[in-house]
Image: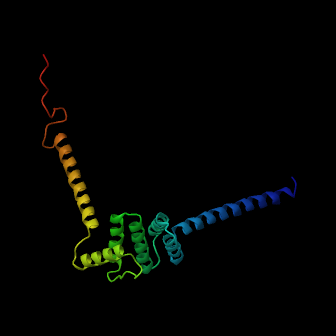
Amino acid sequence: MKTGSYPNTQTSVFRLWVLFIVLILGSSALQAQKKEKCGDLELFTARKSYERGRFQETVDQLKSCQKRGFIKKAQRVEAHRLLALSYIALDYPELAEAEVFALVKLDRFYRPESTDPEVFKTLVKKERKNFREGRRSIFRNWRFLAASGAVLTAGAVLGVSALSSGNGGPGPGTPLLPDPPALP
């Protein structure tokens, strides 16, 4: 047996382990970076996209940030503002209203900037008034109605399946309707 081959094998195994550990730690750091919360830099980038008229790009950037979260409340408020303004520019009034609702819910005393469009200022004023009076916005009522409809539909499906499974209705082998008369 050669005396010089053993240390080289041990060194090779050691190098492989080091490489393996570096790859694991690198991928963990990359995953952590993806899940890192958004901050002022991301808001600055989104604001610049909005100012350049790239409204869909602004929406995409901020939606990504909303999934990861923001560090400060003021950043969340600004994100809702930019999203609402972008939705107004893209002619999605329902989505703009939803963002303004979220903005006012987050900051009841929010005041629009003087440079904001009148449509946005009107939406903020309306949502603040609704919030003060304890009323929900159209968007929130629509979601409530949709959820109620889903619950009622699920109840009806369960009721029909209970009747047809033998819990109060005809058995599994019993037809629900009589056989049609034979044709001449």
Above/below status of 72 relative to 177:
below
Residue 37 visible to an observer of this rendering: no
Residue 4 spot, x, y in % from top left = 87, 58
Quadrant that contains the C terminus: top left
Horizontal side of 125 relative to 3 (left or right) equals left
Q: Residue at x 41, y 67 (%)?
A: 89
Residue 132 visible to an observer of this rendering: yes
Quarter residue 177 falls in: top left
Q: Residue at x 67, y 65 (%)?
A: 22
Horizontal side of 73 relative to 127 (left or right) equals right
Residue 48 spot, x, y in % from top left = 52, 73
Which residue is nearer to you in this view: 140 or 68?
Answer: 140
Quarter residue 114 falls in: bottom left
Q: Residue at x 18, y 44 (%)?
A: 160
Which residue is nearer to you in this view: 176 or 13?
Answer: 176
Above/below status of 125 relative to 163:
below
Q: Residue at x 36, y 74 (%)?
A: 120
